[in-house]
Amino acid sequence: MSNSLAIAAVTTTLRYLLQRRFDSNGSGSVTVTTKPLDKARDNNGNAGNQVNLFLYQTRENAALRNMDIPTQVKLGETGLPPLALNLYYMLTAYAQNDDFPEPTSHNLLGEAMSVFHDYPILNPEDIKNALPAADVAKYDLYNQIERVKITPQSLSLDELSKMWATFQTQYRISTAYEVSVVLIESTRPLKTPLPVLSRGSGDTGVTTQADVTPPYPTLLTINFAAIEQARENLPANQKKLLQKPAANLGDELTLTGYNLEGNNVEIVFNHPQLPTPNIITIPATERTATEIQLTIPTTPPTQWCPGFYTVTAIIGERTANGLPLPIAPTIVNIAFDSRDNSDPNKPNNAIIQVSCNPPVFPGQRVALVLSTQEELLEKIGDRELVSRPHPTQTDTLEFELGDIPPGTYQVRPRLRVDGVDSLVVNYNVTPLVLPLSFIPEVALVIG
């Protein structure tokens, strides 16, 4: 495994191999650099024979990106896989006489390509020799299990032209190489649990069964008792049409699942805004192995708030999975409150008050939607009116309507709390049959 200096170690080793060949074969003074293409030939008198090795791209190795290293992550342990990289280099040759009268750059490029052909794999000794003697301990590429391999890459003339055009410099004869793979070790610690000494009570081993039914408490659905009862009287093709999108306080629920029997059964309602979850203890008469009957309490309402809940069951010492349940706010009253002229940009601003149950918490987003056919309310009809700030838990909210002329308006209000709307369909009629009807409009008197 390597550390984050592995990329620099590869570049240094490749430059070392090239420089060693040029220094030993009598090619004269040849400089090996690792500069960007537009900086390789500077204007400071550096016009001699030169070979430039430019790292132009890095990519994650697809084969090793999610694979643990066998010698470091044992069976039962978990660790973040290493960063596996393929490095892509551009090899370019420059001649001091611009290839006249002899094509010197061609000789240099051929010699450089011969080096990478002779050394297709970087061995640990070459890596150590290439690194600064004082800093060898900082680099650990030579300890990597996977050997670093050098493979020629075939780039089209179009790809080469685009690369040189990117650096806005003149094209020189070049060739490309892929160097892989470099494994950079993650700095996050491994999770190394102790080995298992026994399996289950008395080391009885695993529990097996002949079907796919979960052997532990599992919740499947949350149904509304009134809806399920009404569905029994509907034709088969209409049963799925009768649905209720959210619950209200006081609704009777039926939770279905597996292995729900036990001595102590509790249903837990979790909501991010509640300081502690609401827990309902289920008596033995209201539960079976596959069903649990319960009623959402209506008191005290301050222990509840509208929004999305996660409902789970605790059976003895075992906890079932969680299911989502939206609990909708109920509009208790909507009425005109006052005119606010404190803001010159909002003269004669009409304020209405909406009372709801259960109350909302300070961190909840509350909006009011007024569905109406009244022409004077077209600007605010069917869009969200966000409530004024409510710094404490409250069941009374204020909304701004703007400069609305006095009068009586027929509206069908919806209160939206964290994305859960108050119900606009009337589910309280008896018998509950299709088609369902909307709740009646209310008269909003603006003074």
Image (cartoon, rainbow, N blue to C red):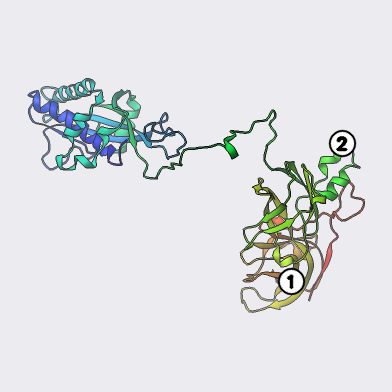
- If you read the primary sequence from the N terminus, does the residue marked by circle 2 or circle 1 appear first? 2
Can you say whether 248 is above or below 10 in the image? below
- Find disc 2 in the rendering and name its residue: 236
**Circle 2 residues within 10 Å: few <14, some 14–19, many ≥20:** few
Question: In the image shown, does 337 or 67 lie closer to the viewer?
Answer: 67
Badge 1 element: strand
**Circle 1 residues within 10 Å: few <14, some 14–19, many ≥20:** some
Report x, y in % for residue 441. Answer: 84, 62
Numbered disc total: 2
Q: Let me know if residue 309 appears in the view.
A: yes
- Find disc 1 in the rendering and name its residue: 353
Badge 2 element: helix
Question: In the image shown, does 328 or 143 lie closer to the viewer?
Answer: 143
Please give the name of the residue rendered at 65% of the width and 70% of the height, measured from the top-left corner: 388
**Closer to us: mark 2 or mark 1?**
2
What amino acid does circle 2 point to? Answer: Ala
The picture quadrant where one finds residue 147 is: top left
- Left or right: 65, with 355 as reference point: left
Can you say whether 278 is above or below 2 in the image? below
Q: Let me know if residue 383 appears in the view.
A: no
Q: In 3D space, how far apart are the residues under numbered discs 2 and 1 (Cα atoms)?
A: 44 Å
Is there a contact, CB below 8 Å, between mark 2 and mark 1? no
The picture quadrant where one finds residue 167 is: top left
